[in-house]
Image: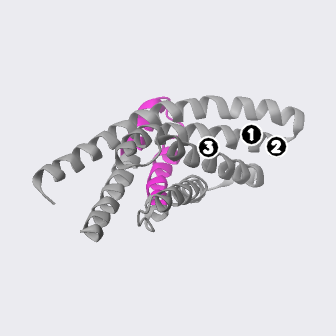
Amino acid sequence: MNDKQKQYDWAFGLLWLITCAVGVAIGGSLAFLSMWGVGEAVGNVAGENVGGMVAGLLFGFLFALGANVGPGILLVRKGISAARWIIYGSVAAALSVSITLGLAFNVVDEMSEAASAVVIALALGLPIGIAQWLLLRQRGMSANGWPLISTAAYFLVAIIITTTSEDSNMPLILASAGLILGAVTGLGMMWLQRRQTVAAA
């Protein structure tokens, strides 16, 4: 790999990092603002579990949407559809978090921070990683590590969120979480691309 290519890779990684941070700050804020209000309103009519499912649907979709818009646009230059990258990840997250909250709505408040972080990582990071891995496979990219990268990244994000959830400065906290998410997934994507380049050489 020549110096020009390395510079391009690091520029790509930096843009990925920035867009993740901004996207998570916006999408995450919208997710937190809307999920409980709407979920509670639905729960009063249809029951707590249904309200939990609606809250999860909103949270998963909006959070993943914010996290994936910027990277999805950046991946267009790599021959990957931005729309599919964003939609695959957002829909997978929405369905997974919805089912998770629907099943565990009554015990969410009783979970420890560590348990909550694991649940969030499995409900967000794993389905997003699997959905996007399928897309990467369709493009002929060897990306078997992507679900693990995504799950690990969202686990770190979940730790930040669960340990600071009572803080009033949520947009700043979410932006910090977005930086962590962008750093882990951005470096992971750069690693996958370099492996692909070496394999093709």
- Residue type at mark 3? Gly
Which residue extends farthest left? 3
What segment carries the magenta color?
150-179
Q: Residue at x 32, y 64 (%)?
A: 196
- Marks 3 and 1, how far apart at CA: 10 Å
Say whether disc 3 or disc 1 marks the residue closer to the N-terminus: 1
Q: Residue at 65% of width from left, 29% of height from top?
A: 34
- Residue 170 in the magenta stretch? The answer is yes
Which amino acid, by three-letter code, is at mark 2?
Answer: Val
Q: Which mark is residue 50?
A: 2
Residue contact between numbered discs 3 and 1, judged by CB atoms under 8 Å: no
Q: CA distance from mark 2 to mark 1?
A: 6 Å
Kind of element beneath mark 3: helix
| 16 sits left or right of 64 in the view | left
Residue 64 position in % (x across, y down): 54, 43
Q: Could you tell whether 104 is left or right of 186 in the image?
A: right
The Cα atoms of the two marked residues, 3 and 2, are separated by 15 Å
What residue would you read off at disc 1? 54
Say whether marks 2 and 1 touch (CB < 8 Å).
yes
